[in-house]
Amino acid sequence: MWQYLVKLWSCIRLLFNTVVDVLLFVATALFLKDSQSPFTVAQGFKSSTRRRFIYRTVSLNDIKFIKNLTNSTVNDVIMGITQAALSRYIHRRYEIEGKRKFSPQKMRCRASVVVNLRPALGVQAIAEMIEKNAVVIQGNCFGFYIIPLSISQLDNPLDYVRKAKTTMDRTKHSLGSLCTFYLSQLIIKLFGFKGATTLAARVLSHTTIFFSNVAGPLEEVSCSGHPLTFIAPTCYGQPTGIMVHGCSYAKKLTFAVAVDEGIIPDPNQLGDDFVESFRLIKEDALSKFRTKVG
């Protein structure tokens, strides 16, 4: 009897979270915007032609150590580091520009997270693509999640990871990304690709950050005899002031950040904030581990 009640409650939560995520996605596309901040594209602002691409590389083993200590996932840790870095940067700008510009404590800051809905292609699936008349699903198949970001200054650096874990655990118990995918397909059928492009552009321009995380090769690879040191994917043309990619490769994880200089004039400082936030979270994790062992 008890297990049926648990399953019923789980289904109710799944339905509720899905409805909330879909309504939030539609509201964001129509009218709901984030608060004005140093990352926000101002109304009527035209994206400058100059984009700066920066990257910072950290240890993947340290990321996994933090993951195990907090009982979270690698994605949770990456999102926690991102929140900590953005918080450091935005509070620095807050102190420089003054309270009249924006208030970090009251601001609405959200991230548009891209979710891959396809199963990961393995060696066997790629081999099937080469065979004649083989039917393998190809092309883009992704949805969106819109998640809130914590920009407040926290005394305990690990709290950024814990907050990220709480947020990501909720999104895992939702079909919001799948619904946004089918909604995009419906828009394409009704209004064509231009309509779907307009939908995506409005969602991205009404949120603060565009975030994506990609799992790279587990072992080092080379191209024509030249070993790859790191992988830092990014893109150009998104209607946001900042885009963050996290990509793992071998024993490293690289944060690739694309910023518009018209909005963020000091991108290297933002990159250093990622490294410093990672260092503080790692030191806090080591301190908690020593206390637990001792």
Image: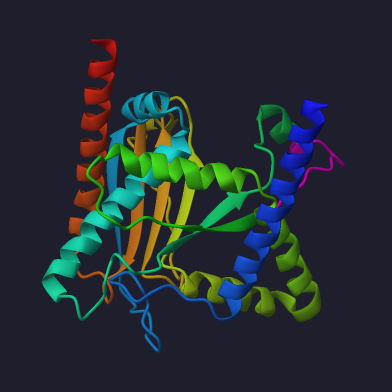
Q: Nearer the viewer, residue 254 or 174?
A: 174
Residue at 37% in and 79% down: 47
Occupied quadrant, residue 132: top right
Q: Is residue 174 left or right of residue 271?
A: right
In the depicted structure, whether residue 183 falls above or below residue 44? above
Q: Nearer the viewer, residue 128 or 261?
A: 261
Residue 134, magenta (yes or no): yes
Residue at 52% in and 45% down: 168
Residue 39 image position (x, y, % from top left) = 32, 69
Furthest residue in direction top, as rendered: 294
Residue at 37% in and 85% down: 45
Q: Is residue 88 left or right of residue 235?
A: left
Residue 167 image position (x, y, % from top left) = 50, 48
Q: Nearer the viewer, residue 203 or 36?
A: 36
Occupied quadrant, residue 60: top left
In the image, which residues are magenta? Answer: 129-139
Furthest residue in direction front, as rendered: 1
Q: Which quadrant: the N terminus?
A: top right
* Main SS of residues in magenta: loop
Q: Which quadrant: the C terminus?
A: top left
Q: Is residue 78 left or right of residue 2?
A: left
Residue 206 image position (x, y, % from top left) = 48, 74
